[in-house]
Amino acid sequence: MIHASAIIDPKANLATDVEIGPFCVIGADVSIGPGSRLGPHAIIRGPTEIGADNRIFQFASIGEDPQDKKYRGEPTRLIIGDRNLVRESATIHRGTLQDKGETRIGNDNLFMAYTHVAHDCVIGNNVVMANAASLGGHIEVQDWAILGGFTIVHQFCRIGAHSFSAMGSVVGKDVPPFITIDGHPAVPRGINVEGLRRRQFSAELIAAIRRAYRLLYASGLKLSEAIEQIRELAKSYPELACMADFVADSSRSIVR
């Protein structure tokens, strides 16, 4: 399962059925779970933990030192869950001591070619980053978010669950759950109707999400008043509570 040309540090810990392609380099303090496969020339540096059934394609660079001038070689980590796809030439970096010291990625995510996940990011489950989408440091991307190709996200931003960014969006503020954005700078364009339908959200719930969007962006209410109105709506549609909580917790403010 391991190509003869691969270089694997003796301190790496690989499950017995891991496939390692030609010219891969696996560093010390790297663990890779069962069923995972690495294409040619993939590089994994540690400390990095990779779960089960992940596929990492050729020329990907995983667990490299963070691109942060304050980094001085401290032992920080990258943790990756299960069933993720990391496509060609994608880069994912470890954390820094300026945050929690780790970058963390959940399960069932797709990182297309040339995507970049910087230090200290936290990515949930079922996230899609299309070709060349890039995250600055300290970013949170919640479950089921989709970042279109060449989307750029500024450090410390949060991307809400079930949101969608159009190709080439430049994101400098938080993106609430369920909404679609595009532009430079990115602005809201409505809710992510197609994505919600694909995930079997009912027509009634989608209509409620649309009402919440209008409260936030088209009602003329102050932000605090819109949040309270969305909380009232969430009494009948609990799925909307995450939207109210997200906006209330925003420190960078939200896209407007």
Image (cartoon, grey):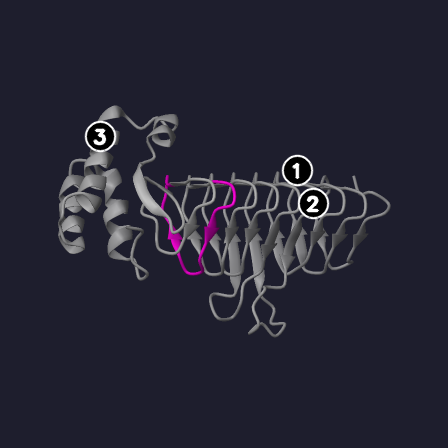
Q: Relative to 26, say whether 95 is above or below.
A: below
Pointer 2 local density, CA inside 10 Å: few below 14, some 14–19, many at least 20 = some
- Which one is earlier in the sequence, the residue at label 1 or at label 2? 2
Q: Which circle marks residue 35 in the picture?
A: 1
Which residue type carries mark 1? Gly
Secondary structure beneath dot 3 equals helix
Q: Which residues are magenta?
A: 148-163
Name the side, left or right, on which 208 lies relative to 164.
left
CA gap between label 1 and label 2 equals 8 Å
Q: Main secondary structure of the magenta part?
A: loop
Q: Position of residue 151 (x, y in %)?
A: 48, 46
Which residue type carries mark 2? Ala
The image quadrant where one finds the N terminus is top right
Which residue lies under the disc numbered 2? 15
Pointer 3 local density, CA inside 10 Å: few below 14, some 14–19, many at least 20 = some
CA gap between label 2 and label 3 equals 47 Å
Secondary structure beneath dot 2 equals loop
Name the side, left or right, on which 206 lies relative to 49.
left
Q: Nearer the viewer's eye, disc 1 or disc 3?
A: 3
Residue contact at pointers 1 and 2, CB within 8 angstroms: yes
Q: Position of residue 101 (x, y in %)?
A: 52, 65
Q: Nearer the viewer, residue 105 or 195?
A: 195
Q: Nearer the viewer, residue 125 or 196?
A: 196
